[in-house]
Amino acid sequence: MNKYAFTFIALLFAIHSLFAQDIPKILALKDRAVLQDQLLEERFKSLLPSLMRKQGIDMWLIIAREYNEDPIIKTMLPSTWLNARRRTILLIYDKGEKEGLECLAVARYNVGTIFKSAWKPEEEPNQWKRLSALIEERNPKKIAIDVSEQYAHSDGLSHSEHEALIENLSQKSKEKIVSSEKLAVGWLESRTPREIALYETLDRITHQIIAEAFSDKVVVPGVTTTEDVVWYLRERVAELKLDTWFHPTVDVQRPDPDKTNWPYDRRPAEDVILPGDLLHCDFGITYLRLNTDVQELAYVLRPEEKELPEYLRKALAAGNKVQDIMTGFFKVGMTGNQILALSLRKAEQDGLVAQIYSHPVGYHGHAAGPAIGMWDMQGGVPGNGEYPLNENTAYAIELNAKVKIPEWGNKEVRIMLEEQGLFINGKVHYIDGRQKQILTIPRRSTIQHLGQ
């Protein structure tokens, strides 16, 4: 049995084990490194050649200096390289379907097992001249570099490095320079089968940490504050030897007429959590170079309450309906702005007051791909809102439905939800289900993250 087959079987076993324990087994750092390098090698063999040919690009240059890393190069470095070294130049050349990709490092040493060193300073002291010679020898039709007006993810070539590159290229090579934007976005947004399998683990871990935080294990009404829960989330991530790509938030909505919803443009104020509060969190983890971004709700039962009030069940149903409306418009080739406009129109027709601000997830929490609204751009997002939807991509289905609660003096409550969805075979699949039941503190019923 080869090492890839063994790892895949181990991965399936790990996913199966999710159903036997609260927090799925998290790999040791050494095992993560082995898996990350395997995933990267698979992406170079099975994904990158097709992406380059789709865009008509036969050479891609990724150039960065230590501690000023291009976002793309961070996704291509071996697991044990936490940063670029000195100046790291990666050259990827497509030699055609028969021979495949040639991956060179214009550096003193190999960059992992994928990029072979192609520079000996003792023979040619000038790194840029060696790069220029390699380009001339291969005579590509197009040379893609990481400059982009729309995506920071694909705009990682610094000003000084760009100037040095152009200065050292021949006129013929200069005329072949193009932006790598579409290629870079495709590389970042596309998920392989094994990454898709891994995402189930990431999402389950995220859901379970939230379930812990929103429980009487952590929350003591009248004592615990929202910031206490925030720091529980941070401490739990550290305890599990994971990372988070943003500082979490936890906020409260309650019947108090003087208590207003917190605005999006600043962090929520700290509150002491009380019975009758509707809690909301925004939380995500980073594991195996992938990210999650999840928002869920919990309700603190009053002493006389044995279960979630019916009015909150109905409010959550409105949020779930907005999810269904939006994901129903996911089709290959649809832009983020088209999905946004159609979804908001349909929600209004159905009597729902909705805001939609969904985005891709992957190597970044706010990842490359089509932006489907922003909280302050409900009329469409310039630039990346016009990017089309592609298969085998992952999204944070992020939105809210505003619902007036008669039991709270007709106060408006925001049902803020965010769940991870994969777009595969023309349909959105919630990776670890979605919240279809508000958690209660203390817990009175089974947690549900089931179904579509």
Image: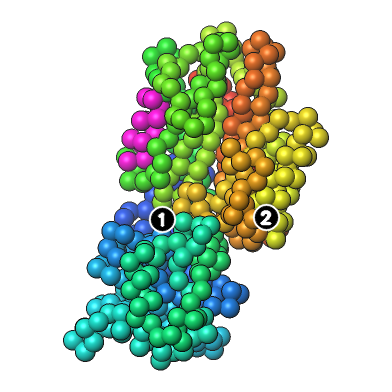
Which sits in the foreground, 301 or 189? 189
User: x%, y% of residue 131?
Assistant: 34, 82
**Relative to 267, residue 411 above or below:** above
> Tag 1's secondary structure?
loop
Find the residue positioned furthest to the left. Answer: 122
Observer able to see residue 434? no
Q: Which quadrant of the structure image shows residue 408?
A: top right
Mark 1 lies on residue = 288
Query: What amino acid type should be assigned to the residue bearing mark 1?
Result: Leu
User: x%, y% of residue 249?
Assistant: 45, 31
Mark 2 lies on residue = 335
Image quadrant where one finds the C terminus:
top right
Q: Which quadrant of the structure image shows residue 234?
A: top left
User: From the viewer's perspective, is the residue at label 2 or at label 1 nearer?
Assistant: 2
Q: Is residue 337 found left or right of 46 in the rendered image?
A: right
Q: Is residue 335 found left or right of 159 in the rendered image?
A: right
User: x%, y% of residue 219?
Assistant: 42, 21
**Numbered range of the magenta stretch:** 227-238
Mark 1 Cα shell of 10 Å, populated few (<14), some (14-19), many (≥20) = many
Which sits in the foreground, 302 or 109? 109
Observer able to see residue 352? yes
- Residue plotted at (37% across, 24% down): 228
- Residue plotted at (35% across, 43% down): 240
Find the residue positioned furthest to the right. Answer: 349
Q: CA distance from mark 2 to mark 1?
A: 29 Å
Q: Is residue 407 found left or right of 35 in the rendered image?
A: right
Name the mark on residue 438: none
**Relative to 444, residue 116 above or below:** below
- Residue plotted at (56% across, 85% down): 97
